Image (cartoon, rainbow, N blue to C red):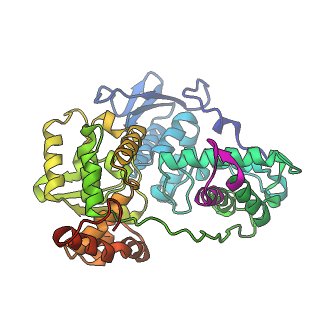
């Protein structure tokens, strides 16, 4: 069985006489020159809609059908399903099935998938599907935000990491006595995944061997593919469970909550200094990096001293619990006030484009920790904020969980493990000898 070729080679315009015609074009920022709705053009009807930075125009021959098409597209926009809107732009014949689904109201737009609009696929068996074919479908699902057991899209950086690990896995299948991409899905078992993990750990990368944690991450990515193969929204194949319990080793991780001295030292060596506002808001609010970089003014309420995070098409949240309200400290509000004064009135983003670049953000952090000689990750600022809420402000664990946007209480408990150490380090800083730069 082959995956429809049209899904691999999307076309932005169709010119057949017996099918709907679609044109998918970029929409200039701030442009409102495109009419949205249904308008007659000779013997045809033009349906126009827009979302984010794209404009979609559909040409249909029947007036009632055009009205139904506009209603169905508006339905998708209401639920921010830009993935399906783009799919209609690439394959306009999908609008006919979308109209049927919309009229029947059998599925909510939030749970609707592209598979619901495509023709039914012939039954497949694990023995006939190769790893390469199943992998190509998985990658397509990642690109179109259709993959996730949680029914939520992954962040772009996660998708990139998944693709890289999968490419390495396919390359590994070509070695030894394995059959490469022709390997069928049924041949992928726990023994093969463990061999893959050992291979990753023993292979050198940039002149040194990968760590055990890196090998475990690569194993988790391939296991995620195997989970998708079994999932109903994936291939829905009846396969044994591929999940593997791995040992994390005897090495103890560094404390995640940074000491007051370490935080102070990091901000003293922050380079370049124009990143100070971004990292201050990150440290004072406990936001995730992606949430902070793509923060919008529509989510900032300076008069209420609070942030109210909601799901955005250009910044999917990690879970439903990530929709939350976070109080602003005096320091965070001060930096946001300054950013508001210097804001671009044509953009809703809090930070200018040069401060929203994730690569530049990571580079600035690496330079800072090297200059400060402090072993810390960006995510440690989030752990530190959680501990500070508990130790300095006496916030309850349940409230901290809501502020951090955690789905599970056990995750919050893990964040607060360093609270006692942080409290002792804070007391030493106030009354006794200074603690080590990055110890708690």
Residue at 28%, 41% in the rendered image: 275
Q: Is residue 43 magenta?
A: no
Rendered view: 54 above or below 81: above
Q: Residue 400 vs residue 232: left or right? A: left
x 47%, y 50%: residue: 155
Q: Is residue 149 above or below residue 93?
A: below
Of the pair 129 and 180, the residue shown nearer to us: 180
Residue 267 or 45: which is nearer the viewer? 267
Residue 204 part of the magenta segment: yes
Q: Quadrant of residue 285?
A: bottom left
Which quarter of the image is occupied by the C terminus?
bottom left
Residue 263 point in image, percent of width and height: 28, 57
Q: Nearer the viewer, residue 298 or 174?
A: 174
Tally the numbered discs: 0
- Residue occupying image coordinates x 78% and y 64%: 189
- Asked if residue 64 can be seen in this view, the reply is yes
Name the side, left or right, on which 380 lies relative to 164.
left
Q: Nearer the viewer, residue 105 or 9?
A: 9
Q: Position of residue 239 (x, y in %)?
A: 75, 66
Residue extending furthest toward the top: 42
**Residue 349 rendering spot, x and y as whole percentages:** 27, 41
């Amino acid at each position: 069985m082959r995956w429809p070729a049209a899904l691999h080679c999307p076309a932005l315009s169709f010119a057949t006489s017996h099918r709907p015609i679609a044109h998918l074009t970029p929409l200039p920022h701030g442009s409102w020159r495109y009419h949205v709705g249904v308008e007659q053009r000779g013997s045809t009807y033009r349906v126009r809609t827009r979302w984010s930075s794209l404009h979609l125009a559909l040409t249909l021959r029947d007036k009632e059908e055009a009205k139904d098409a506009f209603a169905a597209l508006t339905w998708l926009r209401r639920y921010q399903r830009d993935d399906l809107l783009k799919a209609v732009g690439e394959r306009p014949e999908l609008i006919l099935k979308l109209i049927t689904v919309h009229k029947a109201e059998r599925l909510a737009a939030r749970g609707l998938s592209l598979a619901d609009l495509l023709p039914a696929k012939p039954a497949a068996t694990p023995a006939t599907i190769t790893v390469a074919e199943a992998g190509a479908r998985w990658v397509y699902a990642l690109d179109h935000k259709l993959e996730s057991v949680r029914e939520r899209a992954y962040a772009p950086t996660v998708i990139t990491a998944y693709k890289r690990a999968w490419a390495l896995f396919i390359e590994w299948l070509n070695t030894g006595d394995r059959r490469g991409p022709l390997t069928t899905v049924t041949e992928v078992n726990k023994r093969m995944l463990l061999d893959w993990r050992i291979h990753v750990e023993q292979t050198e990368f940039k002149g040194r061997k990968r760590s055990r944690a890196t090998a475990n991450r690569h194993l988790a990515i391939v296991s995620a593919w195997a989970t998708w193969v079994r999932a109903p929204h994936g291939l829905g194949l009846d396969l044994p469970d591929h999940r593997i319990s791995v040992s994390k080793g005897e090495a103890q991780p560094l404390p995640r909550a940074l000491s007051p001295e370490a935080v102070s030292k990091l901000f003293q060596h922050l380079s370049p200094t124009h990143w100070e506002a971004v990292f201050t808001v990150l440290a004072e609010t406990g936001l995730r990096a992606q949430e902070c970089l793509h923060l919008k003014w529509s989510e900032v309420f300076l008069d209420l001293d609070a942030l109210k995070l909601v799901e955005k098409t250009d910044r999917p949240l990690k879970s439903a619990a990530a929709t939350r309200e976070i109080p602003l400290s005096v320091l965070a509000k001060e930096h946001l006030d300054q950013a508001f004064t210097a804001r671009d009135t044509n953009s809703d983003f809090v930070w200018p484009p040069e401060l929203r670049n994730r690569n530049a953000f990571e580079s600035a952090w690496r330079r800072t920790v090297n200059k400060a000689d402090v072993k810390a990750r960006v995510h440690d600022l989030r752990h530190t904020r959680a501990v500070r809420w508990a130790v300095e402000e006496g916030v309850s664990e349940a409230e901290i969980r809501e502020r951090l946007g955690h789905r599970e209480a056990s995750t919050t408990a893990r964040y607060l493990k360093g609270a006692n150490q942080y409290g002792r380090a804070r007391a030493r800083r106030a009354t006794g000898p200074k603690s080590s730069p990055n110890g708690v």
